[in-house]
Amino acid sequence: MEFRDLKQQYQLHKTEIDNAIQNVLTKVNFIQGKQVAALEEVLAEYVGVKHCVTCANGTDALQLALMTWDIGSGDAVFVPDFTFFSSGEVVPLVGATPIFVDIDEDTYNISPQSLEQAIQYVLEKTNLNPRVIVAVDLFGQPADFEQIRKIAARYGLLILEDGAQGFGGRIGTKKACSFGDISTTSFFPAKPLGCYGDGGAVFTENDAWADLIRSYRVHGKGMDKYDNVRIGMNSRLDTIQAAVLLEKIKFFDEEIEKCNQVTEEYTKGLQDVVKVPVVKEGFVSSWAQYTVCFQNNKEREQVIKLLKEQNIPTAVYYRKPMHMQEAFRKYQYRGLEYKVTEKVCERCLSLPMHPYLNTAQIRKVTEHILKSKEVMQ
Ligand SMILES: *Cc1c(COP(=O)(O)O)cnc(C)c1O
């Protein structure tokens, strides 16, 4: 059993994908070939926003957004305490200060109440200027953008939606990567829409910001890349990756549909024994991960061991809260609490999750979790 079955996906669509790659090889248009612009158009339309600017990866996409808003020294950027390192890493990269925020226990996404407390804390206890909320669509489910938007309006903050795991998710009919003032995603192979290497994209409705992002991604270009009007980056999406994504977007919705069937089966089998993921009313997850919580760390480690003996792969996303990462040590603030994140980090476990899991495999996973819980009693 694969944790995420990219082999099967490739075998199913091998002809189209091979042809798409071969086409790029024949034309040798490896950098900014026409497939890149074509993909940007397709993705902007898919998400329902005016601009899509592709780039080299999801981390650069976040950095490009912060650079576009001129975020830097003296600025506070609010980031969930439970997420992949990148969501916070980019903040010191541009010279700003990350303020970590506790999460909601059901959705694993940033808690609006904790967010407001953190903003108050920064205003009252620091000299920092609150500027940006990074809202992550963790494990595929969009963050609570209705509440986040209200808080952003109240304090005059910008919203950066980190949709690296959320691409393809929805709230009502609105798609992930349309909720931020700027939104980003990643095409890392294991993400919901993955390419065959690194890749990322930035989305926005704002024409001026889109122009800035296009400049920053190619060495701060003015007229062209030999006319440099600002300090930028080298962060382009390869033509080969764009060609792969143009094929994969064609069956992407079908895959999300299948993931939702898989998770229904998982939840039916597991809801009486572990804390299963909660998708809020009106929300659709793209299921980057199916993450459950056990009663304590001991129980989780025991289950990991027993599943491994059955060749069932699992992963712990994430073991360490962001505020406890060594790299962020100098940003620790007394007075903010991370009770939910600390609890979830001790108990969470992500199970094999992809569109090609069949009923027998799902049953094998759920039955062995049930069995290991019985062994422990
Ligand atoms: C994967 C991920 C990123 C970074 O994407 P890369 O393409 O690997 O740079 C950022 N944020 C979150 C939440 C992610 O899961």
Image: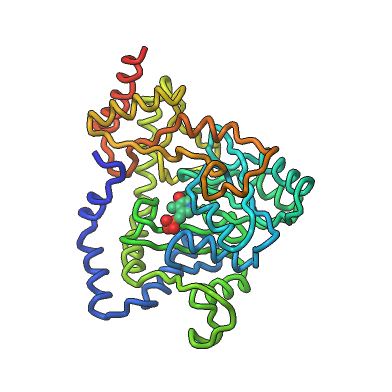
Image-quadrant location for residue 116: top right
Residue at screen point 39% across, 27% down: 300
Location of the C terminus by quadrant is: top left
Residue at screen point 26% across, 69% down: 21
Residue at screen point 54% across, 48% down: 136
Residue 167 visible from this viewpoint: no
Q: Is residue 236 left or right of residue 123?
A: left
Residue 327, percent across and down? 52, 50
- Ligand 1 visible in quadrant: bottom left
Q: State the residue lying farthest toward the top.
A: 377
Residue at screen point 73% across, 55% down: 128
Residue 225, percent across and down? 48, 84
Closer to the camera in the image, 3 or 26: 3
Image-quadrant location for residue 25: bottom left
- Is residue 271 depicted above or below 175 in this figure? above
Location of the N terminus by quadrant is: top left
- Is residue 376 depicted above or below 291 in this figure? above
Image-quadrant location for residue 70: bottom right
Q: Is residue 69 left or right of residue 328?
A: right
Q: How is the image coloured?
A: rainbow
Q: State the residue lying farthest toward the right.
A: 124
Residue 82, percent across and down? 53, 42
Closer to the camera in the image, 101 or 4: 101
Number of residue marks: 0
Q: Is residue 68 left or right of residue 20?
A: right
